[in-house]
Amino acid sequence: MEELRNFNIVLAGSNFPVQQIDLDDFSFLGRPLRAGLRVPVALQAIAGEFRLDVLEERFQVSVVNASPTPDKIGTLQEAARTFINEYAGRKAITAVGHNFQGTATTQLGTGTELLKRLTWRRALAGVIGSTTDPVLSLGVRFRRGFETTSLLRLEASTDDASRFFYDLNFSFSMVGEEAQIKFTAFEALDAFNTSLAVGNEIVDGLSQLRDETLPEEPAL
């Protein structure tokens, strides 16, 4: 994914033993974790571009402002496996999430123009009747693999008008009515690279949309 700068793995559950976590149990490419916040119900720690956040119902390990190299991805997966094996237990995990955020260029000139072509159709423009240029965002739920559901959110970039911002989430639920496909937390962790590949395909496709593939429908 072009300019993918933030990505993370999330484990959801309940009654995670936040106070018992020993930061020395986690290895981040040889960098020691430094606790930034440690209270009975929350833990935050940092090691370079890696970040660990733990609440009683959420474990998140992230890479911030760095590209998704195999060693960084493997480090996130191993940290999540360590948390499951050493602290939470397999049955305590109710969902796993793969998340990606970044920006990409568009062949349509600006991120705003891309969002207008995708969402600002004549019927909607006529109903709203805005006297100023609309500020648009787009959210799409979909499913491509064995994940329970996925969500794509798009906005125009606020830092560079020629780019659009994307936020992709692939969610794997293991309980409730949504859990129609049975898999383990470890299988969901192993699917991270598949989620990354699907995300790459989607973002690259959006980036390559052109006038001839996305004809303009003039607003009223």
Image: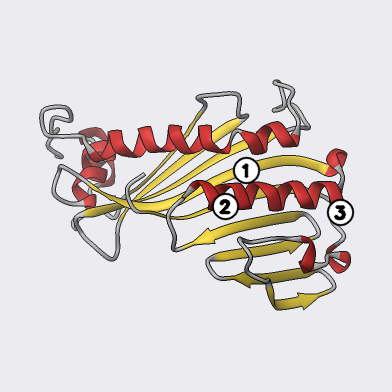
Are the residues flagged by discs 1 and 3 in contact, CB closer than 8 Å? no
Amino acid type of disc 2?
Asn
Q: Circle 3 sits in a helix, a strand or a loop, which is it?
A: helix
Residue 45 percent coordinates (x, y): 67, 71
Q: Is residue 64 left or right of residue 117?
A: right
Q: Earlier in the sequence, mark 1 or mark 3?
A: 3
Q: Circle 2 sits in a helix, a strand or a loop, which is it?
A: strand
Count of marks, rendered view: 3
Q: CA distance from mark 1 to mark 3?
A: 18 Å
Are the residues flagged by discs 1 and 2 in contact, CB closer than 8 Å? yes
The quarter holding residue 160 reads: bottom left
Residue 114 percent coordinates (x, y): 22, 43
Q: Quadrant of the N terminus?
A: top left
Q: Count residues near mark 2 (Cα–Cα under 10 Å), then give few for <14, some for 14-19, many for 20+.
A: many
Q: Is residue 11 left or right of residue 209?
A: right
Residue 209 percent coordinates (x, y): 20, 34
Instruction: Tell which of 40 and 27 is nearer to you.
Output: 27
Residue 48 percent coordinates (x, y): 55, 70
Question: Disc 1 designates what residue?
Answer: 97
The quarter holding residue 92 reads: top right
Q: Earlier in the sequence, mark 1 or mark 2?
A: 2
Question: Disc 3 designates what residue?
Answer: 87
Which mark is nearer the camera, 1 or 2?
2
Q: Circle 1 sits in a helix, a strand or a loop, which is it?
A: strand
Amino acid type of disc 3?
Tyr
Residue at figure coordinates x 71%, y 21% from the top left: 180
Residue at figure coordinates x 74%, y 70% from the top left: 43
Question: Disc 2 designates what residue?
Answer: 8
Q: Which of the numbered marks, if any, corresponds to residue 207?
A: none
Which mark is nearer the camera, 1 or 3?
3
Q: Earlier in the sequence, mark 2 or mark 3?
A: 2
